[in-house]
Image (tube, helix red, strand yellow):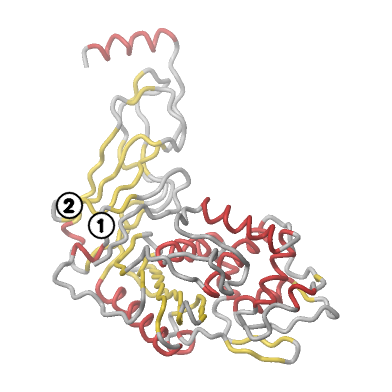
Amino acid sequence: MNKFLSAVLVSFSLASTTLCTSVAAQMPSLPKPLIDAKSWVLLDATSNQIIDSENANLQIEPASLTKIMTAYLVFNALKEKRLDLNQQITVSTRAWKVDASSSKMFIDPATPVSIGDLLYGLIVQSGNDASVALAEAVAGSEDAFVVQMNREAARIGMKSTRYANAHGLPSPDNFSTAADLSLLASRLIADHPQFYKTYYSTKSFTYNKITQANRNRLLWLDPTVDGMKTGHTEAAGYCLISSAIRPNGSGQRRLISVVTGTKSDQIRAQESLKLLNWGFLNFDTVKLYDKGQAVSSPDVWKGNQGKVNIGFTQDLYVTLPKGSAARLKPTLERKDPLVAPIAENSKVGTMKIMLDGKAIAEYPVLALEQVNQASIFGRAWDSIRLLFK
């Protein structure tokens, strides 16, 4: 059983969660799902924990799953106002002449097209011509855009990914892993929720009088599925990243599945839905602490105040096997003594999440406020007190 045990990116601004094991490993009596795929990952995007995986770090050809990074960079440009959805661009010959046998939006150099339409062409129609046109709009050329893709992949922690183009057509220099792709998918949804909602759940799009359906069958099969992207080449097989959001107590919970290397369009949809259902049925996501909630207020030495509130800068969730929440035990380990100055959001400890005596995850505990140094006399007095501590 190949477990994805490496660090998983979370939404904390200064540090990441360390997973001590996959969630499913805490429930050895639960049969592992039999997924007919080369590799797969099931990620709880609410807690940012891997529920389970198989061959998660196996190098694969991502095919059109590459377009998730293309979309992510376009969304970044829109958010930063370097592009506008209504902006009209001229289609280059390079974009127009992209492999005629591959998926296309059918844009034309004679007809300007908006960034908004190109995004529908990229995401819904999986147009390789739209991929190149968007890359050129963001970076001036596809080659320059690829540099940005690889820089962004490194920044968000995709350690086993390399991009060679904006569309995912076969290249020996275009590769990734199921683990990296789950990371990218969760990051896009978290960083650009409105764009995700607008584009990834769209079932069809018409451009140039040609209507094309979204290839993600799960959008029709399960109303809780709201994205994300298919991919296929002869070498890659049929791949699908899918995401579903379902009720979780008084809130909601999102799971992301990555399935690669299946034998058909039908099988990738079938296995993805099987994986999502398995995750929702057998695991719970529990909220431990609110954003900004003080989990402790330890003493501070040599500071202008005697204590400091410590906690998390985002809501903290943990994913567990169903029925095990009562056995959960958070354990705080601090960097004592805490000596001023202490910067706001600096790491001052670690919260270990224990289940049946085993650590299943670790989270950085941060100072929720700044503590400045005391006066010279206050610092001198605390120096003497520390000698006897």
Residue 18: x and y in percent read: 33, 50
The relative height of residue 344 versus residue 216 in the rendered view (above or below) is above
Q: Residue at x 63, y 67 (%)?
A: 166
The relative height of residue 265 versus residue 68 in the rendered view (above or below) is below
Q: Is 195 positioned to the left or the right of 130 in the image?
A: left
Q: Is 2 positioned to the left or the right of 250 in the image?
A: left
Residue contact between numbered discs 1 and 2, judged by CB atoms under 8 Å:
yes
Please tell me which of labels 1 and 2 falls first in the chain. Answer: 1
Quadrant into which the N terminus falls = bottom left
Residue 279: x and y in percent read: 30, 73
Between the residue at mark 1 and the residue at mark 2, the CA separation in whole angstroms equals 9 Å
Q: Residue at x 26, y 53 (%)?
A: 20
Q: Mark 1 points at which residue?
A: 21
The quadrant where residue 118 appears? bottom right
- Rendered image: mark on residue 358: 2
Determine whether the residue tagged by mark 2 lies in a helix, strand or loop.
strand
Q: Residue at x 36, y 76 (%)?
A: 38
Q: Nearer the viewer, residue 169 or 121?
A: 169
Q: How crowded is mark 1: few (under 14 residues within 10 Å), some or many (20 or more)?
A: many
- Amino acid type indicated by mark 1: Thr
- Amino acid type indicated by mark 2: Lys
Q: Which of 152 and 224 is in front in this view?
A: 152
Q: How many marks?
A: 2
Q: Which of 214 and 386 is in front in this view?
A: 214
Determine whether the residue tagged by mark 1 lies in a helix, strand or loop.
loop
From this viewpoint, which residue is outermost toward the right?
A: 110
Quadrant into which the C terminus falls = top left
The relative height of residue 312 versus residue 190 in the rendered view (above or below) is above
